[in-house]
């Protein structure tokens, strides 16, 4: 058999497995890893999936790498063979893909990877309701490699149940010390808000909402806050325990998008107080004291003031514009390195830019990613050396792939925050 024909067979093996029946937890899929050169910028794009199935990255507000930085977590509804959406881990080194969940009811729309251990959290819907579940990936990876997989229940721990009068709204997040999960909820038994609360252009109906806390060890549920609007984008400060960022979710231009609160519900306040010509969206924690967000500039009236990627100090309220494009609709989603050196943002043209936060200089990093069926949602690895995006580059926008792009060495930060485990020679280098 010729080499390229053999490779094609390998890429199709997951599809043959689907036809044979539903794949289960611990199933190993052969590597689909391949590298291409970005025809616009010349950077190397490491594709960890093959465009045979549509594979979506987790949202850029949450960790995407496992604690040991060896695997990237993603979701797909086209790999399991039964039409259900499941979570998967792909090895950056080998390209091998491992299935992490199985069966119906896995809440892949909001997945949380531990920063302190190789554990993974999600909601699973059962007969009695939604159960917050912990997965021991350390055991799962070892048993999957050894071919000694047990039942799903052998790797899962049921933490606690979402009370029946709540529905998820805005996802959930882990506190920095991982003693609690904070869950965005809407109240199912509350009276609907009057129609006049919803303004033209809002796609999401407004309902009374809030944030609850679930104790990771005991499953005990407590209330953090309640809000008179629909909850969205709940994200705990990943560097400082007991602080939560969230948004007023409208599907359009909220009167006051970003909010912040302490875990006990105190000091609940707007993070950036918006004016009538501000359109704020896509906020994300960068370090313990700073949040990046996008001030939209896609309408002429919005360009009468500074727009684009913004940095705000959550302690002082100090605001710093980081950069905007002069063409198209401007920047959309954003992320940044934890040392505050680089920001990244995508646009509707399928491009991803690096922005030097010290000088304001913009670098077109990678392009042609076809913002259908979704945006690239750029984020950085824990060591700030790599960017992760989802891309329609190869499929011409028909399916998404998981893609890693190395930051050129001369653009990488001179500082390094050690997390996870690395080979001894690498660890020693960073400690010197």
Image (cartoon, rainbow, N blue to C red):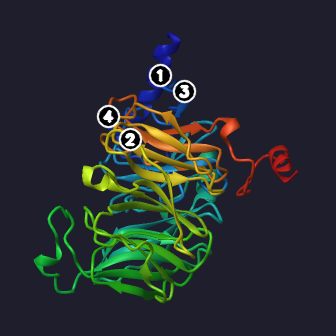
Helix, strand or loop for disc 3? strand
N-terminal of the pair, mark 4 or mark 3, is 3
175 and 316: which one is in front?
Answer: 316
> What residue sits right under mark 1 in the picture?
39
> What residue sits right under mark 3 in the picture?
35
N-terminal of the pair, mark 1 or mark 4, is 1
Residue 269 placed where, x, y %? Answer: 43, 82
| Cα–Cα gap, marks 4 and 3 | 18 Å
Residue in view at x 53 percent, y 78 percent: 243
| Cα–Cα gap, marks 2 and 1 | 23 Å
- Determine crowd level at label 1: few under 14, some 14-19, many 20+ residues with C-alpha closer than 10 A: few
Left or right: 194, with 60 as reference point: left
Is residue 164 visible to the viewer in this orientation of the structure? yes
| Cα–Cα gap, marks 3 and 1 | 12 Å
- Determine crowd level at label 2: few under 14, some 14-19, many 20+ residues with C-alpha closer than 10 A: few
Q: Residue furthest top?
A: 2
> What residue sits right under mark 2 in the picture?
326
Q: Is there a contact, CB below 8 Å, between mark 1 and mark 4?
A: no
């Amino acid at each position: 058999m010729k080499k390229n024909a053999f490779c094609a067979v390998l890429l199709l093996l997951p599809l043959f497995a689907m036809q044979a029946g539903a794949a289960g937890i611990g199933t190993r899929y052969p590597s689909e890893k391949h590298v291409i050169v970005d025809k616009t910028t010349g950077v190397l794009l490491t594709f960890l999936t093959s465009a045979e199935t549509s594979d979506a990255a987790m949202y850029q507000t949450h960790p995407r790498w496992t604690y040991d930085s060896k695997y990237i977590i993603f979701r797909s509804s086209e790999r399991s063979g039964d039409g259900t959406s499941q979570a998967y881990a792909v090895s950056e080194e080998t390209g091998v893909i491992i299935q992490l969940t199985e069966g119906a009811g896995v809440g892949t729309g909001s997945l949380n990877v531990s920063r302190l251990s190789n554990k993974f959290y999600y909601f699973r819907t059962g007969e009695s309701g939604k159960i917050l579940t912990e997965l021991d990936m350390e055991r799962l990876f070892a048993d999957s490699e050894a071919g000694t997989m047990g039942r799903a229940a052998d790797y899962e721990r049921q933490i606690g149940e979402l009370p029946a009068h709540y529905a998820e709204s805005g996802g959930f997040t882990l506190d920095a010390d991982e003693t609690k999960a904070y869950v965005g909820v809407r109240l199912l038994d509350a009276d609907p808000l009057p129609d006049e609360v919803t303004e033209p252009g809002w796609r999401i109906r407004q309902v009374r909402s809030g944030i609850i806390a679930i104790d990771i060890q005991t499953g005990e549920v407590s209330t953090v806050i309640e809000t008179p609007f629909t909850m969205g984008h709940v994200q705990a400060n990943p560097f400082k325990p007991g602080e939560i960022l969230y948004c007023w979710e409208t599907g359009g231009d909220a009167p006051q998008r970003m909010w912040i609160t302490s875990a006990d519900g105190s000091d609940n306040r707007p993070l950036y107080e918006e004016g009538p010509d501000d359109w704020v969206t896509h906020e994300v924690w960068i370090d313990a004291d700073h949040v990046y967000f996008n001030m939209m500039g896609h309408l002429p009236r919005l360009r009468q003031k500074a727009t684009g990627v913004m940095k705000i100090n959550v302690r002082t309220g100090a605001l710093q514009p980081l950069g905007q494009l002069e063409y198209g609709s401007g920047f959309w989603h954003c992320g940044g390195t934890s040392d505050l050196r680089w920001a990244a943002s995508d646009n509707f043209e399928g491009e991803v830019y690096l922005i030097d936060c010290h000088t304001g200089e913009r670098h077109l990093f990678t392009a042609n990613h076809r913002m259908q069926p979704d945006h690239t949602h750029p984020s950085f690895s824990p060591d700030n050396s790599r960017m992760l995006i989802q891309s329609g580059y190869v499929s011409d926008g028909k399916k998404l792939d998981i893609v890693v792009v190395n930051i050129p060495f001369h653009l990488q930060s001179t500082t390094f925050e050690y997390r996870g485990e690395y080979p001894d020679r690498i660890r020693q280098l960073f400690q010197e």
